[in-house]
Image (cartoon, rainbow, N blue to C red):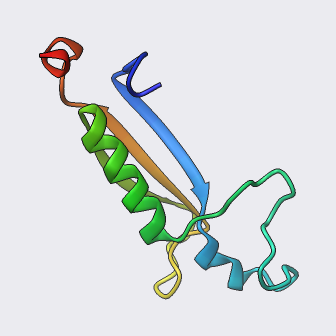
Amino acid sequence: MFGSARPRTVLVTTPNVEYNVRWESLPAGQVRHGDHRFEWTRAEFRAWAEAVAERHGYGAEFVPVGPDDPEVGPPTQMAVFTLTTPKEAKAA
């Protein structure tokens, strides 16, 4: 999507696995929902998003979704990707 469609803005959200300790009914090591293939830490998500942004000519801004716990961060994390390099410039 980033390399082919190149939309101006892309929003990506993922559960913050660090927040899972705040869910009392969630056993340690379990994902919040059965359809989650993965849940990343804030550092993992940031590293992935920054690499994708750099590779495809986007900027990335990180936004908490839900209450931002001072110890473990928000329950959901979001990256807002904004196109900074036009397709023509990227191909050059």
Residue drawn at x 68%, y 59% is: 38
Q: Is residue 42 above or below residue 86?
A: below
How many numbered marks, from 0 up? 0
Q: Is residue 5 left or right of residue 69?
A: left
Residue drawn at x 25%, y 43% is: 54
Residue drawn at x 28%, y 39% is: 55
Q: Is residue 27 above or below residue 45?
A: below
Residue 7, given in percent of the width and then of the height, sits at: 39, 20
- Viewer-closest of 89 and 69: 89
Q: Is residue 26 left or right of residue 70?
A: right
Q: Residue furthest top?
A: 88
Q: Is residue 18 left or right of residue 3?
A: right
Q: Is residue 73 left or right of residue 7?
A: right
Give residue 92's quadrant in the image. top left
Give residue 10's quadrant in the image. top left
Q: Is residue 82 above or below residue 67?
A: above
Residue 71, given in percent of the width and then of the height, sits at: 49, 88
Q: Is residue 30 above or below residue 7?
A: below
Residue drawn at x 38%, y 61% is: 47
Residue 74, given in percent of the width and then of the height, sits at: 54, 70
Residue 84, given in percent of the width and then of the height, sits at: 19, 30
- Viewer-closest of 73 and 59: 59
